[in-house]
Image (cartoon, helix red, strand yellow):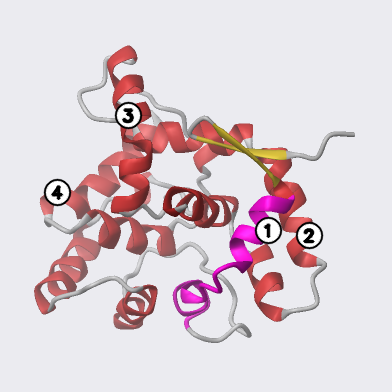
């Protein structure tokens, strides 16, 4: 029986190769971000509140923050349309769509942080991932560049004015479901605490870590 694979921007990698990618080089930034520095903690769960410790998580992820970023993010959180995006919303169930769709509500929440309060892509997506961990992918410049051509092409064919990064990520996530499941089982059965911690992350986050590794290689 063929080994399950993950599909990433036209690339196809085996679950076992994704496991190796997560081990080498040893990148433990996710411990600081996803587990607030302690693997005894739980991974992120839904919340409508942004607190000062959240910024510590971003710093441990390697995100650069200024005092203005922190102030803007706190202000954005107070005014954000949280209620329009359920805490248990899942990216695989949120396809691209127009006004009034779950996708429109989700991207409105993102745009509130990204554009109304002028926060960078990584800051906005990282904060929102912590608050909607099954919905918002954690994007950075590397992943945006990696998916750029596909996001632009899909936008053109979908009559969207903006590149559809979430949608191309979502489609790869769906196509990679068997590979993600196999990878999660392998990580969960490992002897080390770091692998088991990776296995407890949301599909969006676990897949995103692999995508970032592929984009870097």
Q: Is residue 146 above or below residue 129?
A: above
The overriding secondary structure of the stretch rendered in magenta is: helix
| Mark 2 vs 1: CB contact within 8 A | yes
Tag 1 residue: 19
- Residue under the point 50% across and 46% down: 89
The secondary structure type at the circle numbered 1 is helix
The secondary structure type at the circle numbered 2 is helix
- Residue 98 in view (yes/no): no
Tag 2 residue: 186
Q: Which residues are magenta?
A: 16-36
Image coordinates for residue 183, horizontal then vertical, percent:
72, 53
- Residue under the point 32% across and 54% down: 140
Tag 4 residue: 115
Q: Is residue 104 above or below residue 214?
A: above
Closer to the camera: disc 2 or disc 3?
3
Q: What crowding class fits label 4: few (fewer than 14 Cα within 10 Å), some (14-19), or many (20 or more)?
A: few
Q: What's the distance in space between the residues labelled 2 and 3, CA to CA?
A: 32 Å
Tag 3 residue: 149
Q: What's the distance in space between the residues labelled 1 and 4, CA to CA?
A: 36 Å
- Label 4 or label 3, whichever comes before in sequence order: 4
Quadrant containing the N terminus is: top right
Query: Does the magenta portion include 13?
Result: no
- Label 2 or label 3, whichever comes before in sequence order: 3
Residue 55, image quadrant: bottom left
């Amino acid at each position: 029986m063929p080994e399950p694979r993950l599909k990433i921007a036209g690339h196809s990698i085996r679950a076992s190769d994704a496991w190796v990618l997560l081990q080498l080089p040893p990148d433990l930034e996710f411990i600081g971000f996803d587990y607030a520095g302690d693997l005894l903690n739980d991974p992120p769960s839904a919340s409508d509140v942004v607190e000062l410790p959240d910024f510590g998580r971003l710093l441990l992820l390697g995100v650069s923050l200024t005092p203005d970023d922190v102030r803007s993010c706190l202000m954005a959180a107070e005014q954000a349309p949280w209620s329009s995006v359920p805490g248990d919303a899942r990216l695989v169930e949120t396809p691209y769509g127009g006004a009034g769709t779950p996708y429109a509500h989700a991207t409105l929440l993102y745009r509130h942080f990204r554009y109304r309060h002028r926060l960078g892509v990584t800051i906005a997506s990282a904060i929102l991932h912590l608050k909607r961990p099954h919905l918002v992918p954690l994007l950075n410049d590397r992943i945006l560049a990696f998916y750029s051509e596909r996001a632009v092409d899909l936008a053109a064919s979908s009559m969207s004015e903006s590149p559809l990064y979430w949608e191309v990520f979502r489609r790869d996530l769906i196509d990679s479901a068997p590979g993600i499941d196999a990878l999660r089982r392998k990580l969960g059965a490992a002897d080390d605490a770091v692998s088991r911690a990776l296995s407890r992350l949301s599909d969006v986050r676990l897949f995103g870590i692999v995508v970032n590794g592929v984009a870097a290689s």
